[in-house]
Image (cartoon, grey):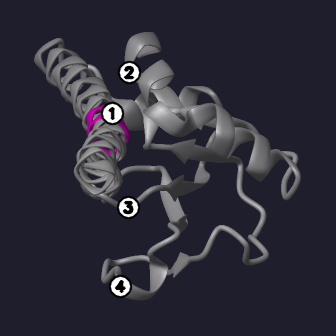
Amino acid sequence: MKKGIISIASAIAGAATGAGITAKQVTKETKRQKELSDKHFALYLLMNQWVKVKQENKSIASYLEKKGYRDIAIYGMNYVGETLLGELAGSGVNVKYAIDRNADNIYTDVDVVMPDASIEKVDAIIVTPVTFFDEIEEMLSWKTDCPILSMEDILYEV
């Protein structure tokens, strides 16, 4: 009889432990999905604002030129970074290089360096991953004294 009770108790304990582990994994995955959702929503809002800026016939290049930013770097060469590079092509703003933690796998018209590499002096660095701006700004501020600008702020100031 004791063996039966011990077996039942072991099964219950095993089930409870399994449920606890599963709940922890579900909570972790839910948090990851929420962060990803927030990131993509922020990118959607950013691109939506960019469309509004274009519809108002305003120019990011003109804005940067008025601020005296002629030579810049772009941090983040995913969708926003590539789009910004394309928009600035042929303007008075020269993108000297880009910075991206995936530099080895990015093929674009400018040199791409890793964030931990030494960086060339520019008039400003534009950060395109807006949900991580604070962390990126803090990291870059140790490497340069030029202004570090959020793409989001630029689009709302143009």
- Can residue 130 be seen in the rendering of this structure? yes
Q: Nearer the viewer, mark 2 or mark 1?
A: 1
Task: Write down the quadrant of residue 67 in the picture.
Answer: top right
How would you rate the neighbour count of disc 4 (Cα within 10 Å): few for under 14, some for 14-19, many for 20 or more? few
Residue drawn at the location 31% of the way across and 38% of the way down = 16
Q: Which residue is mark 4?
A: 105
Q: Secondary structure at mark 2?
A: helix
Closer to the eye: label 2 or 4 = 4
* Dominant secondary structure, magenta: helix
Task: Say which mark, if any, is on residue 155.
Answer: 2
Amino acid at pointer 3:
Met
Mark 3 is surrounded, within 10 Å at the Cα level, by few (under 14), some (14 to 19) or many (20 or more) other residues, namely many
Does label 2 or label 4 sit earlier along the sequence? 4
**Residue 130 % position (x, y):** 45, 33
- Comes first in the chain, label 2 or label 3: 3
x then y, percent, for residue 6: 34, 50
Task: Tell me the SS state at disc 3.
Answer: loop
Left or right of 144 in this view: 156:
left
Residue at 22% of width from left, 25% of height from top?
41
CA neighbours of label 1 inside 10 A, class few (<14), some (14 to 19), many (20+)? few
**Is 29 in the magenta?**
yes
Whichever of labels 3 and 1 marks the residue nearer the N terminus, that label is 1
Tell which circle, 2 or 1, labels the residue nearer the N-terminal end: 1
Instruction: Name the element at disc 1.
Output: helix
Q: Nearer the viewer, residue 89 or 17?
A: 17
Task: State the residue position of label 1.
Answer: 27
Q: Given the image, on which type of amino acid does mark 2 rest?
A: Leu
